Image (cartoon, grey):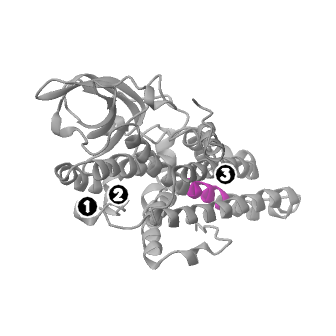
Amino acid sequence: MYKPPDYYLTDELLSDEHKIVRTAVRDWVNRSVKPIIEKAAQEHIFPIHLIKEMGEIGAFGPYIPEKYGGAGMDHIAYGIIMTELERGDSAIRSAGSVQSSLVMYPIYTFGNEEQRMKYLPRLATGDYIGAFGLTEPNHGSDPGSMLTHFKDKGDHFLLNGSKMWITNAPIADIAVVWAKDEEGIIRGLIVEKGMEGFSAPETKGKWSLRASSTGELVFDNVKLPKENLLPNVKGLKGPLMCLNSARYGIAWGVIGAAMDCYDAALKYALERKQFGKPIASFQLQQKKLAEMLTEITKAQLLIWRLGVLRNENRAFPAQISMAKRNNVEMALKIARDSRQVLGAMGITGDFPMMRHMMNLESVITYEGTHDIHLLITGMDVTGIPAFE
């Protein structure tokens, strides 16, 4: 049985509602994700049937008001959900992150009432699957240089361009796409599946996030109704606010991957015998386990404090950036170290380490690379932007 580490009794910082949410999502992951995820990753298939189940347990847009299909919970509840989903697999958490932070969040925050009522309830239940189009083939860390653009044709917009490395793209019913208008101002648009000229080819051959559906968004003279423009934001501020929400969720989520690896390594070390005694009795194995537990505990305290600040609307982007960078690096190192505890067994699908390790190689790159997040912190403390 899975026993999550809580060395500093962080459970005492959570409300009863938080614990109820965690139990519900944890039980669902044990029941619906764990039994199938290794096979899905090995076969490079996204288990799309889980989307509706995620909607049923309230994993999508939990901080969105109930009026629009959300649960009206706080940001710590959202983080807890992401932690449990990523314990299952980063691909499952990615689907939840995109749906919640990159599709529902911008429609709720930047959309009008008609757009909210049209899309959010269906996204909350998983009847609609969403994607987020920002990254382009030649513009990743520098989204302000995007080439995707649209023109005003009187009774509609005409959208052209392409996006890539888009989670959910091949299966998405709608995509929130960021493109430049004729004045070069970045705006948000809702593009729907089936619109002429809109295609979403799948990206295959990945060694990472193999159980995630990844693809491109291609726009070839797509006629877009004017009511599909998000009216309440202009400029790069829009997509960056979405990324702040997603990065916050990632910083919680990767702790789940780290805890899954640690739990498996600890159990194995106590059971596996060499030289007549459990390998947990050897100093170097204890060193690995003690360091893993220390880093998980530090990450738990960091993200809890960030959750409090976000609930109080006091968390600023550089704080979120620091947590994303620190916690992903922590989880990736724990995946690697825990794999070593298991020796050769650690590379098999009987244990989660190698799958988490490969997934986290993507997580450390997307939603802002590790290096870019270092430079965001550097800019915040020096006032000098090193990436411009």
Horizontal relation, residue 286 to residue 6: left or right = right
Q: Is residue 265 above or below residue 8?
A: above
* Dot 1: element: loop
- For disc 2, the neighbor class at 10 Å (few under 14, some 14 to 19, many from 20) is many
* Depth order, front residue of 114/85: 114
Picture quadrant of residue 168? top left
The percent coordinates of residue 286 (x first, y second) are: 81, 61
The percent coordinates of residue 91 (x first, y second) are: 47, 46
- What secondary structure do most residues of the magenta stretch adopt? helix
Q: Where is mark 1, residue-wise?
A: 69
Q: Are the residues at dot 3 and dot 2 in contact (C-beta closer than 8 Å)?
A: no
Q: Residue at x 67, y 51 (%)?
A: 330
- For disc 3, the neighbor class at 10 Å (few under 14, some 14 to 19, many from 20) is some
On residue 61, the disc is 2
The residue segment tinted magenta is 254-263
- Residue 89 appears in the picture as rendered: no
For the N terminus, which image quadrant?
bottom right
The percent coordinates of residue 239 (x first, y second) are: 40, 41
Tell me the kind of residue under disc 2.
Gly
